Image: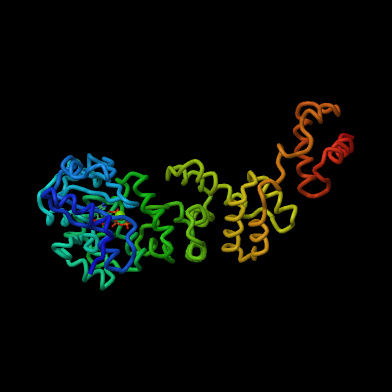
């Protein structure tokens, strides 16, 4: 029932040939059963990390990605497979990452520690599907269900609360009753989880391409955990953001801009989420320009200039505004696609410079102001960007 590419099988066989047990496990089995292409493959094995490493000759590239967690990554023929030693239920402290590692000799123990039944299936060519927690049934029924007692599982690692929502949203599955109740009961345990782990789950939900994320977070009472700043919004406002998020293409900056658009604390929130400075500035620039005029050719060029002549960013701004105000920017988007970075004016490309202004008797601050005015005049097509015209123009504005 499974067809594994030869390269993947070869990786698997190295472990078997050295006398270890090995199984493909987790997300790749789930995805394959759903007839989706897994984006990564995991193998679980009885070999300890060092033993696993010694199974591979130099045709394989081995990276000890997480020896602490018992994980190595094997790169082979355009595949990267994570190989992790069987682990049992670990001792958890403070509702997050295990305090100690608990390697085990048993696949069953390893499957028991996994979060959801649909993620707890294993497969090997020799054994076929191993499904001790009835994940395949839940998969067919479209259910996310914890392995074991949901309250305990969410208490052990509160990140599973978000993983639960992420999988339910991504596959459009329901959350099984007991799991659902436990999720609601334990949701405030999310406070124990590091912000990096939270945003990583949250951002992948935002960009998984499926609609109505905000509605789902609200109905699970999780929006108040993730974004308490949204508490002040009423139903209409929340519905509006939900719809805007649905309309936007799958792009993290665009989704973040839509999400944060109705609240004042966007910058503080992006800081709290520890997103890169680059992403933060990009999103803040979108929010900043959401309401600036761009309807005249001059306003359009000015907006582009004011934002570092970043054509890709301007493209995103237009898409955002289409989703927000139902403005039709088809023509502008086409125009933007044909624009060449060289066609765009900036200080460097201006045919005169500070020295020229000085020669004409300007000094200090006046030079800067003059150059700004020149840029503006070129943007508004009041004057052409050539030396002669610009110098004439300076003579006029000097007075
Ligand atoms: P994706 O397609 O998003 O990568 P995945 O199921 O492969 O989904 P990973 O985060 O790659 O998710 O984790 C791989 C497997 O490890 C999961 O399928 C699950 O069995 C197990 N797992 C991951 N995180 C946890 C966790 N916090 N608690 C228990 N099991 C987990
Ligand atoms: Mg995965």
- The spot of residue 21 in percent (x, y) is 13, 53
Left or right of residue 100, residue 286 in this image: right
Left or right of residue 127, residue 308 in this image: right
- The spot of residue 223 in percent (x, y) is 40, 57
Locate the N terminus by quadrant: bottom left
Residue at position x 57%, y 63% in the image: 323
- The spot of residue 64 in percent (x, y) is 26, 40
Instruction: Name the image quarter holding residue 208.
Output: bottom left
State the scheme by which the image is colored: rainbow
Ligand 2, by image quadrant, is bottom left
Camera-side residue of 79 and 344: 79
Q: Compared to 67, does 288 lie above or below?
A: below
Furthest residue in direction bottom, as rendered:
141
- The spot of residue 95 in percent (x, y) is 24, 47
Total marks placed: 0
Locate the C terminus by quadrant: top right
Residue at position x 22%, y 43% in the image: 57
Left or right of residue 204, residue 337 in this image: right
Camera-side residue of 125 and 103: 125
Residue at position x 28%, y 41% in the image: 63
Q: Compared to 100, does 31 lie above or below?
A: below
Residue 131 visible in the displayed image:
no
């Amino acid at each position: 029932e499974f067809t594994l590419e030869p390269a993947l099988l070869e990786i698997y066989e190295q472990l078997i040939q050295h006398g270890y047990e090995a199984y493909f496990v987790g997300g790749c089995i789930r995805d394959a059963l759903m007839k989706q292409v897994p984006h990564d493959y995991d193998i679980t094995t009885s070999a300890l990390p060092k033993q696993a490493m010694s199974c591979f000759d130099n045709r394989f590239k081995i990276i000890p990605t997480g020896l602490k967690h018992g994980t190595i990554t094997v790169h082979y023929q355009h595949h990267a497979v994570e190989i992790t030693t069987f682990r049992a239920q670990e001792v958890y402290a403070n509702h997050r990452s295990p305090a100690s590692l608990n390697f085990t000799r048993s696949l069953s123990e390893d499957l028991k520690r996994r979060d959801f039944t649909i993620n707890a299936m294993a497969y090997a060519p020799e054994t076929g599907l191993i499904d001790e927690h009835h994940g395949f049934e839940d998969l067919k029924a479209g259910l996310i269900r914890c392995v074991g007692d949901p309250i305990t599982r969410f208490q052990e690692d509160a990140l599973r609360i978000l993983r639960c929502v992420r999988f339910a949203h991504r596959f459009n599955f329901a959350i099984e009753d007991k799991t659902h109740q436990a999720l609601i009961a334990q949701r405030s345990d999310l406070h124990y989880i590091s912000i990096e782990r939270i945003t990583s789950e949250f951002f992948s939900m935002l960009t998984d391409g499926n609609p109505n994320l905000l509605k789902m977070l609200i109905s699970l009472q999780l929006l108040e955990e993730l974004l308490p700043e949204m508490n002040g919004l009423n139903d209409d406002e929340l519905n509006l953001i939900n719809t805007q998020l649905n309309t936007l293409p799958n792009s993290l900056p665009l989704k973040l801009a839509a999400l944060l658009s109705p609240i004042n604390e966007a910058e503080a929130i992006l800081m709290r989420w520890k997103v890169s400075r680059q992403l933060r500035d990009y999103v803040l620039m979108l929010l900043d320009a959401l309401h600036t005029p761009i309807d005249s050719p001059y306003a359009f060029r000015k907006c582009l200039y004011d934002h570092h002549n970043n054509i890709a960013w301007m493209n995103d701004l237009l898409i955002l505004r289409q989703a927000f105000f139902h403005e039709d920017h088809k023509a502008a988007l086409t125009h933007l696609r044909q624009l060449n970075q060289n066609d765009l004016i900036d200080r460097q490309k201006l045919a005169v410079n500070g020295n020229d202004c000085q020669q004409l008797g300007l000094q200090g601050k006046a030079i800067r102001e003059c150059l700004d005015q020149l840029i503006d005049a070129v943007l508004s097509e009041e004057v052409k960007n050539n030396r002669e015209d610009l110098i004439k123009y300076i003579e006029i504005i000097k007075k």
